[in-house]
Image (spheres, grey):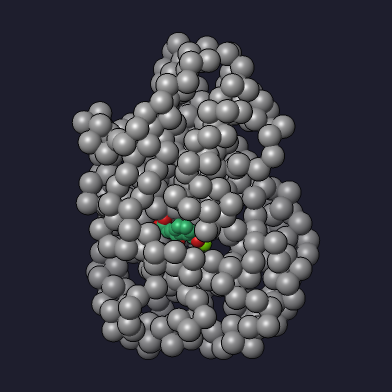
Amino acid sequence: MRIEGVELRRISLPLRTPFRTSFATETDRDVLLVRVVADTAEGWGECVALAEPLYSPEYADGAADVLRRFLVPALPRTADAHAAERAMAPFKGHKMAKAALETAVLDAELRTAGLSLAACLGASATRVPCGVSVGIAGSVPELLDRVAAHLDAGYTRVKLKIEPGWDVEPVRAVRERFGPDLPLQVDANAAYTLADAPLLARLDAFGLLLIEQPLAADDLVQHAALARVLRTPLCLDESVESAAHAAAAISLGACSVVNVKPGRVGGYLEARRVHDVCRAHGVAVWCGGMLETGVGRAANLALAALPGFTLPGDTAPPSQYFDEDVTPPFLLEDGHLTVPTGPGIGVAPLPDRLDEATAETEWLPL
Ligand code: OSB
Ligand code: MG
């Protein structure tokens, strides 16, 4: 496949309701889409970096800069996704920028071959159960209303964002209102320290599926110490940027579950390796989300269909977050989404919707 050039496209989608985490309150999703134009097909990738470097060091403008300055110029003119991955490897970090470009190349390659991403990755499931991530609310009654609406919509598990001051009480309230059978988990986005272990141990009373990333991204040793005092399974998100990190975390005893986000680990090829390492060790994985548009969500569904993804992911349809997405809508049926079967990621942006949402485009010839 001969690559002619790469388009960087910045789009902005207002969120239906602000999404509050321990690190930010998102009101708009400022997304960088990457389109690879090859002789045989076009391919799309979504960069999941947020507008500000608050979840991880990457941010959308920085991702655009490293793509323009280093990653796109490093692409060989004749490339597939593996060649793109190798060409970008010398540049340190910038996993989300790399993932977007690699995914766009992979999408074009698979469209050329007429193969779906799910088939390429070795996925088995045709539909995947869908969890929902619930931001920090203004009050407990407001949180209970939101969770009730999500359960009415059919979601199969609920994840509550927590932070110091919004942890034991909201979890207790959700458990009391919705009962012991609700699959429930929490995500702290690194908001605690090991000194909070006694507080976090109070969550053990609520039968959570897991606690996600309680401590800082580079606190692997501290996560291992915390895991030894919690009964709740410990899951890592921010700490795992590669299959090698997953292997290190597992051998340290720092986690018994891993949230796999393709953007965070540099793409779907590495996400597959994270899955493989975890599966070989009996460590459960699930597919995380970054408030993606349909472009990113479609690809995540293919990943979530791999056999090691034994827990519901943050794979809510984009309509959960946006009134209008850039792709055709995804339908939540009985709490599940169908894994796309079309070539590549299986969806493409609708030209009119894309133009409406676009703030800026830039063409980088190869
Ligand atoms: O930590 O999982 C996270 C969104 C933005 C940044 C980080 C996270 C999240 C989510 C999103 O929880 C969930 C989703 O995309 O559905
Ligand atoms: Mg998380």
Residue 130, horizontal then vertical, whole percent: 39, 58
Front-lying residue, 115 or 26 = 26
Residue 302, horizontal then vertical, whole percent: 46, 42
Q: How many numbered discs? A: 0
Front-lying residue, 349 or 182 = 349
Residue 300 position (above or below residue 41): below
Residue 198 position (above or below residue 352): below
Q: Residue at x 25, y 31 (%)?
A: 355
Res 119 seen here: no
Q: Viewed as shown, does residue 191 lie left or right of 250?
A: left
Q: Residue at x 34, y 39 (%)?
A: 11
Q: Residue at x 28, y 84 (%)?
A: 141
Q: Residue at x 28, y 73 (%)?
A: 146
Front-lying residue, 281 or 165 = 165
Front-lying residue, 180 or 241 = 241
Residue 117, horizontal then vertical, whole percent: 47, 34
Residue 186 position (above or below residue 300): below
Residue 96, horizontal then vertical, whole percent: 55, 43
Res 109 seen here: yes
Residue 190, image quadrant: bottom right
Residue 322 position (above or below residue 95): below
